[in-house]
Image: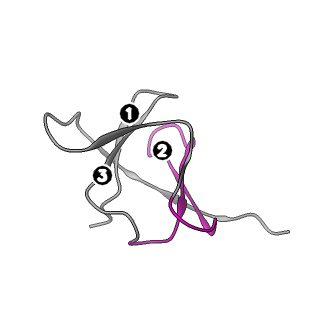
Amino acid sequence: MSPHTRFSFKLVTPPFEGRVIEVPPVLNASDHTVDFVCGNCSAVLMYGEHGQVHNVTIHCLACGSYNTTNEE
């Protein structure tokens, strides 16, 4: 079995409003095709597809960084 494709989230500054999810445990947005990882420490934060989850900030509990699901 080949390893999954990995995509690094973009880091953002801590938000003052909006949706923030603390991870781990890893978010499972869909069948596992892409490993979305923390832009700082490379911990796997979400399994899913590109463009599937929007406007969510993920707080990585492994290193304390904030990551955005927005790919722009």
Check disc 3 and report its element: helix, strand or loop. loop
Tell me the amino acid under the disc marked 2: Cys
Closest to the camera, between mark 3 and mark 1, is 3
Identify the image quadrant of the C terminus.
bottom left
Look at label 1 and name its amino acid.
Ser
Task: Please check the rendered image and state whether residue 36 is part of the magenta-colored stretch, yes or no.
Answer: yes
Residue at position x 14%, y 33% in the image: 16
Q: Amino acid at mark 3?
A: Val
Question: For the residues marked 3 and 1, what is the alpha-carbon distance in whole angstroms?
Answer: 14 Å
Residue picked out by circle 1: 65
- In this rendered view, identify the residue nearer to me: 72 or 33: 33
The answer to if 40 sits in the magenta stretch is yes
In percent of width and height, residue 25 lies at 56, 38
Q: Which residue is mark 3?
A: 56
Q: Quadrant of residue 5?
A: bottom right
Q: Earlier in the sequence, mark 1 or mark 2?
A: 2
Judging from the image, what secondary structure is the residue with disc 2 in?
loop
Kindly state the secondary structure of the residue where label 1 is placed: loop
Q: Residue furthest right?
A: 1
Q: Please determine whether, in this image, residue 36 is positioned above or below residue 41.
A: below
Measured in 3D between alpha carbons, the distance from the residue under mark 1 to the one under mark 2, in whole angstroms, is 8 Å
Sooner in the amino-acid sequence: mark 2 or mark 3 = 2
Instruction: Identify the image's colour scheme: rainbow, by chain, secondary structure or one colour.
Output: one colour
The residue at which mark 2 appears reads as 38
